[in-house]
Image: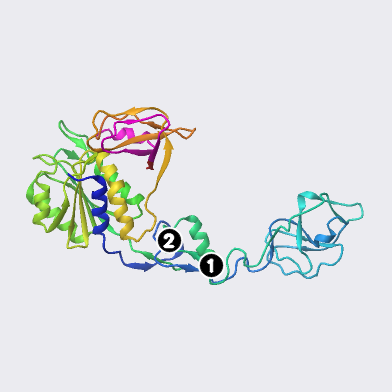
């Protein structure tokens, strides 16, 4: 049994390669990992433009009555130059006409009886977005390694990056084992339970932005287990095996992994939940996890070990982060031999409260959880007000 930190380092160090890349249309790149830097092909803004609806004029004339000489829409070219005591009614995004050096907010203007424009305040900002103040042509706008989000889509659209280079998605195989399991559409017989782990992992894989391949429920025999592991190892980048076996959780699975050619790196971790977690590599390019059968255990170890591995394979430079939040109540535990992860909620006033939690089979507790908090080996109590690391889920 090794410490969690050691297990994490082993998994990360095993990923000594990254996946191949491909070009996709930017509208299909949401959630993908950018594999190249993106530079702007234009200056932004491409001209001095109005930041709001109003009246473009000379700042030195703002306390005088102004003659309106033109109405200028966004996308139009000014026909006139602004002279002394003149203004042009301008819309947001329109080109600032020659001669003008400010835009008066329309909310602070009024029309005089003779049709002039009067500004009702004594001073004004320029209210102009200046040429290339956001980004210059050739400037870096997005860096490789980011997970593409809606705001990145907007940036790519603005600089014409319509075919970004992204990392290919890893293929992840999911195997459920256990003669006691039935698929969710069936009513379990006595001694049977529905397979929740497999579908939980499918959802977690999808949320991680990659491709799950579900191999179904495998019966608890050496031959069946050997065959499905062999098939998955040859078809996938990462294999996730979860569930109990007839001889006890993962009692013969490590042996079968070795028979298939897997190099096992560790067989258990000093954590709670998730102690009987196995990790190994196959031909240095494929990775396999034997996750515990209890749903909270498999959920937690996926988030803590598998998801960071997925990110590294796709060259995602942003691993999930923890945030420090104070405890709202005191929390104690009876045993401290292992690092513990407990589900918590975050209150509206920004404090952490443990969720009622009955152990690693109590997946319903996670329905109400905002995140998990880790408690180090040897630590038995979290004090009120103590800052704890919260990993949001």
Numbered range of the magenta stretch:
361-389
* Res 93 → quadrant: bottom right
- Say whether residue 369 is visible: yes
Q: Looking at the picture, how far across and down is residue 305, in whole percent?
A: 28, 49
Q: Give the residue at the far front of this rendering.
A: 378
Q: Looking at the picture, how far across and down is residue 314, in whole percent?
A: 33, 60
What residue do we see at 31% from left, 67% from top? 20
Say which residue label 2 marks: 28
Q: How is the image coloured?
A: rainbow
Frontmost residue, 262 versus 326: 326
* Res 229 → quadrant: bottom left
Sort mark 1 into few (<14), some (14-19) or many (20+) by Cα contacts within 10 Å. Answer: some
Frontmost residue, 7 versus 173: 7
Q: Looking at the picture, how far across and down is residue 346, in whole percent?
A: 43, 35
- Say whether residue 199 is visible: no
Above or below, 365 relative to 104:
above
Sort mark 2 into few (<14), some (14-19) or many (20+) by Cα contacts within 10 Å. Answer: few
Nearest-to-viewer mark from 1 and 2: 1
Say which residue label 1 marks: 159
Question: Is 373 covered by the magenta stretch?
Answer: yes
Q: How many marks?
A: 2
What residue do we see at 77% from left, 54% from top? 124
3D distance between C-alphas at marks 1 and 2: 17 Å
Q: Is residue 85 left or right of residue 383?
A: right
Identify the element where label 1 is drawn.
helix
Quarter of the picture containing the N terminus is top left
């Amino acid at each position: 049994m090794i410490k969690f930190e050691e297990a994490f380092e082993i998994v990360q160090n095993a990923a000594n390669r990254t996946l191949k890349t491909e070009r996709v249309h930017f509208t299909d790149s949401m959630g993908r990992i950018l594999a190249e830097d993106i530079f702007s092909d234009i200056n932004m803004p491409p001209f001095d433009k109005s930041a709001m609806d109003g009246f473009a004029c000379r700042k030195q004339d703002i306390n005088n009555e102004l003659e309106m000489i033109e109405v200028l829409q966004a996308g139009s070219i000014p026909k006139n130059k602004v002279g002394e005591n003149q203004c042009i009614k301008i819309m947001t995004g329109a080109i600032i006409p020659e001669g003008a050096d400010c835009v008066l907010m329309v909310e602070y203007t009024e029309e005089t009886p003779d049709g002039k424009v009067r500004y009702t305040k004594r001073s004004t900002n320029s209210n102009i977005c200046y040429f290339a103040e956001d980004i210059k042509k050739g400037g870096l706008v997005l860096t490789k390694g980011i997970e593409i989000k809606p705001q990145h889509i907007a940036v790519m659209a603005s600089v014409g990056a319509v075919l970004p280079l992204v990392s290919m998605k890893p293929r992840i195989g999911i195997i459920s084992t256990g003669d006691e399991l039935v698929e969710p559409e069936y009513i379990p017989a006595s001694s049977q339970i529905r397979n929740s782990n497999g579908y939980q992992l499918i959802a977690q894989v999808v949320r991680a932005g990659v491709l799950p391949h579900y191999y179904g429920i495998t019966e608890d025999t050496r031959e069946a287990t050997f065959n499905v592991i062999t098939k998955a190892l040859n078809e996938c980048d990462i294999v996730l095996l979860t569930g109990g076996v007839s001889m006890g959780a993962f009692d013969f699975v490590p042996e079968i992994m070795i028979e298939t050619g897997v190099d096992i790196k560790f067989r258990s971790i000093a954590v709670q939940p998730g102690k009987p977690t196995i990790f190994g590599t196959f031909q240095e390019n494929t990775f396999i996890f034997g996750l515990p059968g209890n749903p909270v255990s498999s959920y937690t170890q996926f988030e803590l070990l598998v998801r960071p591995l997925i990110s590294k394979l796709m060259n995602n430079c942003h691993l999930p982060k923890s945030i420090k939040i104070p405890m709202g109540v005191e929390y104690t535990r009876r045993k401290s031999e292992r690092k513990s992860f407990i589900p918590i909620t975050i209150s509206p006033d920004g404090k952490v409260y443990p969720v009622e939690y009955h152990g690693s089979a109590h997946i319903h507790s996670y329905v109400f959880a905002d995140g998990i908090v880790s408690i180090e080996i040897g630590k038995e109590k979290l004090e009120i007000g103590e800052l704890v690391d919260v990993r949001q889920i």
